[in-house]
Image (cartoon, rainbow, N blue to C red):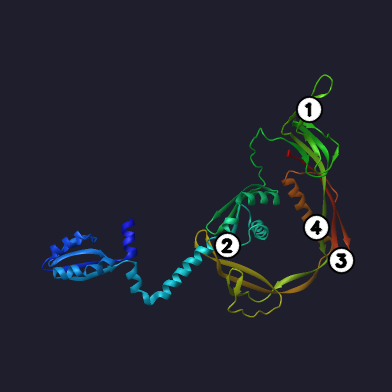
Amino acid sequence: MLLKLLRYLFGFVRVEVCGFAPERLMNLLIKDEIVIWDIAETEHGYSFYIGRKNLLNIKPYLQKTNMKLKVVSRIGLPYFFKRNRRRATFGIGCLIFVALIYTLSLFVWEVKVTGEDHIVAEEMIKHIEKNYIPLGTLKSDIDCSKLEADLRKDFEDISWISCELKGTGLTIHLEEGMQPKTIEDNNIVGDVIAVKNASITKMITRQGTPVAKVNDKVKKGDILISGTIYIYDDNNEVMETNYIAADGDVYGKTSYKYNDYVDLNYYEKEYIDEPVKHITLFFMDYCLTPYMPGISSEKYDTYTQLHKLRIFENFYLPVGYKVITRKPYKLTNMTRDEQTAADILNDRLDKKISEFQENGLEIVKNGVTIEKAGDRVEAKGKIVVVEPIGKLVKHN
């Protein structure tokens, strides 16, 4: 295989020789170690392959044996360039294109999030692009393990996350809300601490030394169950100290501030005319709009559909086009009565309480009141709940 490649790189030809002494010519070439191959007998002599450089060296042998040579075909890279020398610009363009594609393949041009609804995924993508992986980041600079740890800190509801670099895309696979599977590690030692200010309502200690008790008021960071166990002798002196991973369930009463309002005077959108569309071309951060049609109103909503060029399934490029839709509207001044505003606020409050309950929080007291304040109706107060407040923190 290597020999064939070298022959193609340096070039070779297929020739036919004819005359009165073809056998003598063959003998002379073999004697002087001039390489020929694939020798075949013809009506008037022989045909064979010979290297491009050796072709120039066999002229004395042809004269000596009174033989004639005819070139049947020229094969190899030197002949290819010679035949296509007038197409050099096209070839150079192809090489530049290949080099450009290779260079672009070294960067991340697409970030995707799976396992979440569209709105949450869009918010997470913006967060990642703003704080960690801006589009155009070198793939070699990305540490997936560190990114996973950072996202776990930023989004506490994430129970499982995995980052995958494939092609020019970064995909974030995640699950939210489910409790992660814990792997027991006998080498872990630590304390259960309070994750927020609370008044303890229930406490079950499975392992460790309780530091707090029911009805105690604790602050965020206070130790609830210590992972340090002291063994005393008969004189009540510490004889031995052991360190373990504290374990237990601690529930506390906490409160959440709630603020919301609804204006009695408001504006309502009324869409007018048909939506107007136009196309914008983009390359990285540069955009070009060939033509933008006029619109009947200065007020309009804009919707953008992004179409990014993709060569393969995960090989995105920073070039493509956007379909931008503008929907003109006018604003109409509207009013609502106090009862309607209060109903809207009650619906929002019920949704918030339902979210608390879905997350396992027990509602103890709803201290939110709804009152009229000027041109708006406001909902203010505190929602008191009972929730888990303990978290295991490893010893340093």
* Amino acid type, label 2: Trp
Numbered tag placed on residue 375 in the rendering:
3
Q: CA distance from mark 4 to mark 3?
A: 15 Å
* Amino acid type, label 3: Asp
Callout 3 environment at 10 Å: few (<14), some (14 to 19), or many (20+)?
few
User: Which marked residue is nearer to the observer: mark 4 or mark 2?
Assistant: 2
Callout 2 environment at 10 Å: few (<14), some (14 to 19), or many (20+)?
many
The residue that disc 1 covers is 230
The mark nearer the N terminus, 4 or 1, is 1
Q: CA distance from mark 4 to mark 1?
A: 54 Å
Is 231 left or right of 316, judged from the image as shown? right
Asked whether the beta carbons under mark 2 and mark 1 sit within 8 Å of each other, the answer is no
Q: Residue 392: percent from the left, percent from the top?
A: 73, 39
User: Which marked residue is nearer to the observer: mark 2 or mark 1?
Assistant: 1
Numbered tag placed on residue 345 in the rendering:
4
Q: CA distance from mark 1 to mark 3?
A: 63 Å
Instruction: Name the residue located 73 percent from the left edge and 43 percent from the top edge.
Output: 360
Q: Residue 128: percent from the left, percent from the top?
A: 65, 57
The residue that disc 2 covers is 109
Q: Residue 377: percent from the left, percent from the top?
A: 85, 61
* Amino acid type, label 4: Leu
Dot 1: what SS? strand
Q: CA distance from mark 2 to mark 3?
A: 48 Å
Which of 64/282 is in front? 64
Numbered tag placed on residue 107 in the rendering:
none
User: Which marked residue is nearer to the observer: mark 4 or mark 1?
Assistant: 1
* Amino acid type, label 1: Tyr
